[in-house]
Image: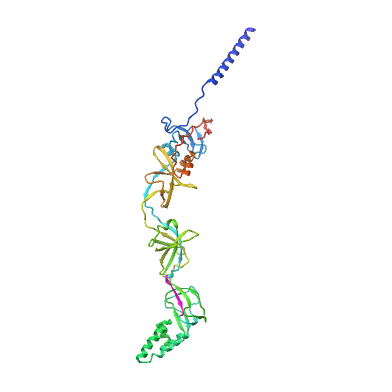
Amino acid sequence: MKRPLIILASVAAAVALLVVGYLSGRRQAPMAPAPTPVSATNADTAGKVLYWYDPMVPEQHFDHPGLSPMGMQMVPRYAGGGGTDAGVVRIDPATVQNLGVRTAPVERRVLPTVLHVPGTLAWNPREASAVSARVDAVVSRLLVRAPYTKVAAGEPLAELLAPQWSSALAEYDALQDAQSADAKALRSAARARLQVLGLTAADIRAARRGAGAAITLHAPQAGVVTTLEVRDGQRVGAGQTLMMLNGLATVWVEASLPQAVAGTVHAGTPVTVTVDAFPGQVFHGSVETLLPDIDNATRTQRARIVLANPDGRLSPGMFATVQLQPAAGEAVPVVPSDALIATGTQTRVIVAEMDGRFRPLAVRTGRSSGGYTEILDGLHGGEKVVVSGQFLIDSEASLSGALERLGERGGVPTAAASAPRPATPHDSHAGQVVPSGGRP
């Protein structure tokens, strides 16, 4: 009986010693060194994949390539991705192809500038004329009864009774039968007086035929009666305007030019004008002058355009769309407009470099035309910019903190940045890759 107990006690003691030895060995074993940041200058680790991530959710890290839980193709993060240039992102060629990244060169070309600006048709005041009384008179009859009546050249407008005209006509008529040399001189003086009083040769002939005491005023040109200041029976003074006429052979178009493009327009710039009243019809003209006046509300400058209007269809007050074609300028650096990434504070592009490296770069843009945008500062020509997939790369650059420094400095960061930390061990369940919880 004692022998089995002794054997059992010996076995228990041996097991206890083994457990104690195992635990002691674990406590005394050296700890595994913690992963150190990967330097971009370390040739042994350069190009090593640290982890895989979804570009749409870059804070989630995975140990293997494939599709993310969102169904996006995951991209690798390399040990040398940070490098000595902060913000430079490195993507292997296969992933670049899978993401559909496309690039286009920065070219120098002349932008075909075509401006479309609003405009309004207006009277051409150079075709305006006044109809006035040369002497004190009374309006015996108005032949034009309302404003904006169209009249032809020479059409009668009003009949006036003026005692001064009557006496001058009687004096001239009395001298017609005199044959002396002095009488001829007096007739010439009397006729000149009638002309000074505003009577035409036709008025003088009509008065001599006994057409009546009233003198008829005629339209000096074809046009529209824009203002009518008198009525029948009204007394008017010498020099008083009875009505205003404005011709419609030409009209003005006043176009509003933004200040950014006003400098490219000058006198003689060809234009085409369309109006809503006549869809499909185009009217051609040219800029006559730029008015030296800036609208305080819209900050626009007016361009005056003269349009021929032979049939009088164009009426002042119509709205118009003016297309201007300024003279071609010099070749400038341009990029496809799709390559631009606009933020609240700046505009940037993603520049493609060698070995799958992509760099965010702030630029200053100018005019846009035909799908291209002028680059005023930041690019000079010859570089390649990303035109498709740039937002995914921009997301990675934001993850590395480059774009924050880019906004502070107004350009591409140049300070060195340490490489991201390797991913922490991942968790897996039922053969599915799940987020490991690591942080860059």
Q: Quadrant of the N terminus?
A: top right
Give the answer, above or below, for where 114 lies relative to 76.
below
Q: Quadrant of residue 172?
A: bottom left
Magenta range is 126-133
**Which is more toward the observer, 326 or 33?**
33
Q: Quadrant of residue 350?
A: top left
Give the answer, above or below, for where 265 lies relative to 46.
below
Q: Position of residue 155 (x, y in %)?
A: 44, 78
Q: Position of residue 13 (x, y in %)?
A: 60, 13
**Which is more toward the observer, 252 or 266?**
266
Query: Is 132 included in the stretch rendered in magenta?
Result: yes
**Which is more toward the observer, 302 or 417?**
417
Q: Is residue 434 visible?
A: no
Which residue reaches farthest right? 1
Total marks in image: 0
Q: Position of residue 3 (x, y in %)?
A: 62, 7
Query: Is 117 included in the stretch rendered in magenta?
Result: no
Which residue reaches farthest left? 181
- Rendered image coloring scheme: rainbow
Q: Position of residue 430 (x, y in %)?
A: 54, 30
Q: Is residue 130 visible?
A: yes
Predominant secondary structure, magenta span: strand
Q: Quadrant of residue 102?
A: top left
